[in-house]
Amino acid sequence: MNLKPTLLLPLFFAFISTLGAQSRGSVNYTQEIFSYSANQTEVQINNQIPIGIPSWLVNLLVGVDNGITGYKVNYNTIDHNNQPIVATGLIIVPDVTCDVDMLTYCHGTVFDPLEVPSNESGAGDGMEIIMGYYYSANGYLTVMPDYIGLGPDATMNHLYVHEDTEAAATRDLMVAAKNLQNTLGYDLTGDVMMTGYSQGGHAAMSTFKDIIYNPISGLNLQVGGMGSGPYNLSGSQYNMIINNPFYENPEFMLYVMSTCQTVNGNIYNTPSDILRAPYDNLYTTHILGQTGNVDWVPSYYPSMFQPGVYYDLKYNFSNPTRQCLAQNNVYDWYHTKPLEMYYCTGDNTVTYVNSFDAEEAMEDYYPWWKFWLFGQVNAAYAGWFDHGTCIIPYAVLNKLELEFYQSWCWWWFDEEEADQRSAADEGIAIRTRMYYNLDIDVSHLKHQISKVEFLDLNGETALLVNNPTVTNQLISIPVSDLAAGLYGVNITDETGKSILTAVLKADVKPLVHESYDPVTFNVDLNQIELDLSLLDEEVDELNIYENGVRLDRIQGNQEDMTMLIDASELPREVALEIQVITKYHQYFLPVVLEQKQSNTTALYVYPNPTSGAFNIEADHAFNQISIYDAAGKLVFTDQLDSYTRNHIFDLILETGMYQIIVTDQQGNRHTERLIIK
């Protein structure tokens, strides 16, 4: 291992003495701790992959593109009292010649304070360090905090699942990475992806929240992809632990109590207040002493508590430990960034209910004018694996999903040879999620595809399609009969060359809101009118399904605020689904033709656009009107003296787009878009 300190270690102690004058994210020293070629990186990853992972998934992990160099970074941050403190972390630089995106990866629970990224280690007896190798070797500048209280330079105990210090340590290492560009020889695009697993899922969510509320200058947070995180600490996660006296990681409770005692000071006066002998002394030696030894914790963990303590933990909702955890919940807050929360159903360490709690709570914040955001926050199934193994499918799925946001280096690609690419080239257009079909764009391939094989998580062939049909440069394979979950997809061309990728078979999540429906059916014109005024993405493709069977496919970028779809060949009075596909997302809108006609042409606004007065005319008499701006802010509301079908308004509104809502005599709400020029 090559160690190259960029600042002499004796000078470090001078930095410690003047830390109060240092700004958050400023760097005390950096130290190169490893440098691997692409082949060496593949070996490092392969040596640490858990047993029981199917070979196709292993092949995806070890198939990397670049060499990497890792640097330990000692930097300045703040503790739980907002006092200056030193922390350490790892920055891994990919061997590329172009600007790179930053990917922040937060690690899972470790009990040994030296089992951290800056020591080229991690959770799972060091296995988790491969996450840094994997992401960096695929083109990201990867930032991996040790967290406060962990690492070789730690000066206090680690505060376990503590939102503020997790966010501070992670955020400030990101700032350090931004400031080290010239020193370590890389250039950032400014885009950031936020990731993490287990405790790291909680830490990543903490930082995601912190940066959204307090942005970092020069860094643009793009997307979050967390795995198996305990986001609802005081709810679903606490219940999983406290209701199972044989919970497989009972030491977690002791680390939580230690943290809550440090932060709030109300858990005990002495450890013997809550722990029987000899556990009180063992707690002091190993938990407070951070030795990393937890073998002494009994499998039936209630037996280590003093009488009444476990009962109080279980049944007293005002218990200080539960209240402390509630202070560090990160599942219930408002944001407008895309977020995937991956989980495995075989996880007995962090319940997958955490992901659903977060999905539901976050979506509850969205009003109707944020309609499309409901499809951008998702609990995503990654398989039936246990907690220790789920990290692998999570990493692969997350990497593939993030590629939609990643800034790519295209210097290796000769556009003049675009029509000569084979199936062995990485670049076949396949989305990371399939619902009713797997669509494969073959427009840039020289050779025909001869075989498409789907591999399940047991390594078995789940579906095999020989000589698939190509229609309009597209292979479309029905996958409705496949169970939800992660699949390897091996695509072979007629020359025998193949490419392996992974795809998540996902259940359809219908996008509906009681106060808004972007789909109306115009009976007179025999067309579907799709309102896209609230969608801030261009539509690349649109599909219409009946019972999972595609009836129509419409391609091409759609930039207009309303999309008109010919419905003359579509069935009536049956449940249909409109799939709206953008660069980053897929949305499903339910519709039943002719049941929509009561809303058709219910509301007319003219002239539109307008620079002044406008008229509202409706099929049904109304007496209440509300106008919202593009940000969802109510800018005008009025209740008329009587019901009318026609009314002229002369309002002073700023240039922009507005949403008009009128309420008729039956209490039905009708919406229309207004543009002020």
Image: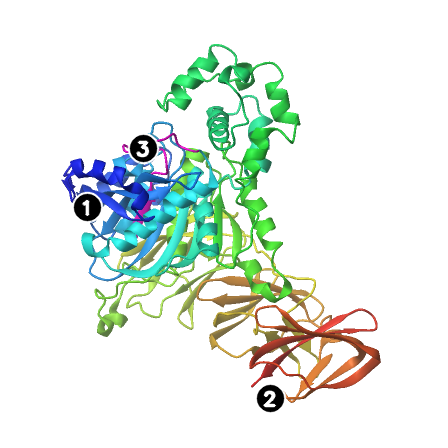
Q: Evaluate whether residue 629 shows in this view.
A: yes
x and y percent of residue 482 in the render? 51, 50
Q: Which residue is mark 3?
A: 154
Give the residue type at disc 1. Asn
Q: Nearer the viewer, mark 3 or mark 2?
A: 3
Q: Amino acid at mark 2?
A: Ser
- For residue 363, which quarter of the picture? bottom right
**Residue 507 forms part of the magenta stretch:** no
Seen at 50% across and 55% down, the residue is: 479
The image shows residue 643 at horizontal and vertical percentages of: 84, 79
Vertical arrangement, residue 659 with respect to residue 386, above or below: below
Amino acid at dot 3: Ala
Can you tell which quarter of the image residue 568 is in?
Answer: bottom right
In the image, which disc is placed on residue 39? Answer: 1
Q: Position of residue 415 (x, y in %)?
A: 24, 72
Q: State if disc 2 and disc 3 touch (CB < 8 Å).
A: no
Query: Which of the pair 529/459 is nearer the observer?
Result: 529
Say which quarter of the image contains residue 591. bottom right
Q: Is residue 81 above or below residue 334?
A: above
Between 333 and 456, the residue placed more toward the observer is: 333
For marks 3 and 2, give the CA distance: 63 Å
C-alpha distance separating marks 2 and 1: 63 Å
Q: Is residue 621 left or right of residue 36?
A: right
The circle drawn on residue 611 is 2
Give the residue drawn at x 26%, y 50%: 137
Residue 146 falls within the magenta-colored stretch? yes
Q: Which residues are magenta?
A: 141-159
